[in-house]
Image (tube, rainbow, N blue to C red):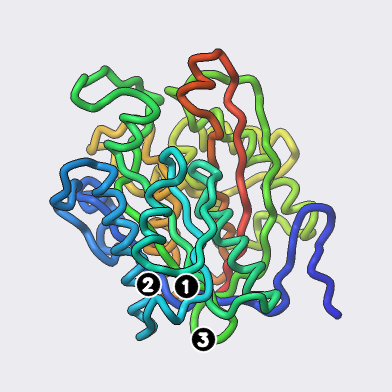
Amino acid sequence: MTSKRLGRWTVHFPGSPRLVSAASVVGPKEGEGPLHSYFDAIELDPMRGEMCPEAAERRFMEDACSRAIQQLALTSEDIDIFLGGDLLNQVITAGFTARSLQIPFIGLYSACATFGAALALAATLVDSDWVTTALVAASSHYQTAERQFRYPIELNVQRKPTNQWTVTGAGAAVIAKQGQGPKVTHATIGRVVDYGLKDTNDMGCTMAPAAADTFLRHLADTGRTPGDYDLILTGDLAAYGSKMFRHLVKEAGIGLGNKHQDAGQLIFSPQQKVGAGGSGCACVAVVGLGYVLKQMAAGRWHRVLLLPTGALFSPVTHLQGESIPCVAHAIVIEG
């Protein structure tokens, strides 16, 4: 039997579960960014006609999930399990979406790294033959995140240069053992890393140590180098966190060259006045399922390492003076 463990922390999927469909749905600000042509749908109304942004975010996730399923000419009854998450308390976006889909559901939370956790778990379930098809999804919304983690946008609080702009949108994909699409070949689940940082206005630098920790352990387990990847895509470190990530990896004696990009830097342009860049569960989900998969389909990249990052704090722990624990997961996708 082929071993599925590599080193101490990494799992190899010999059955090569595939990303057989993918959908990315974003709001108007994301649609104005440099990646606009790679998204499946751009909604001009971030509220989606709803009375509150929480209901609007739900519409984004439901839309992405429906598109991913319909691409395969399937219905929700053909999907064995739904793995989804978001940033809101009790992962209400994913939970209410699961209510609509009526698919057996596991709600997940790794903050902005949730899409990576969902993808890794889906690949594990499919590769182990526990399920045949798994739907994964992650979402975020600028207004819901601001209201929960910072301030209602109506207060017009002045933002700092290190602040990031939460991506409005959702990404969804179907993972299956049979079908056409790139393979999910490895996953390195991150451990929680806390450097004692407390600044919720600089989440990129706060998450960078977790990204470096998971990345270095992934390389050690697999025996690979950055040169073995066409792209190393972190989730939402944005401008300042990306610089810190490069510094930490360089301190470990590893140069990234031109292999590293960050979803939070890619999704918006500097002219859009988004501070350091994008963030949120949807950030790496829509960039990965939109931009990255379409570039892989075009033959530009053949092996990509997704490295979603997340800060595991809440407004309560922040007010209690706690530091911010963070996590990152590494997922290998091969064309």
Left or right of 318? Residue 268 is left
* C-alpha gap between disc 2 and disc 3: 14 Å
Identify whether 45 is placed above or below 208.
Answer: below
Residue at point 45%, 46% (across, down):
91
Q: Position of residue 15 (x, y in %)?
A: 69, 79
- From this viewpoint, is residue 258 visible? no
Question: Residue 160 appears in which quarter of the rendering?
Answer: top left
Q: Position of residue 97 (x, y in %)?
A: 37, 58
Q: Position of residue 59 (x, y in %)?
A: 27, 56
Q: Which residue is mark 2?
A: 68
* Residue in front for this viewpoint, 113 or 148: 148
* C-alpha gap between disc 3 and disc 1: 10 Å
Quadrant containing the C terminus in the rendered view:
bottom right
Q: Residues within 10 Å of mark 2 (few under 14, many from 20)?
A: many
Q: Residues within 10 Å of mark 1 (few under 14, many from 20)?
A: many
Q: Which residue is mark 3?
A: 179
- From this viewpoint, is residue 177 visible? yes
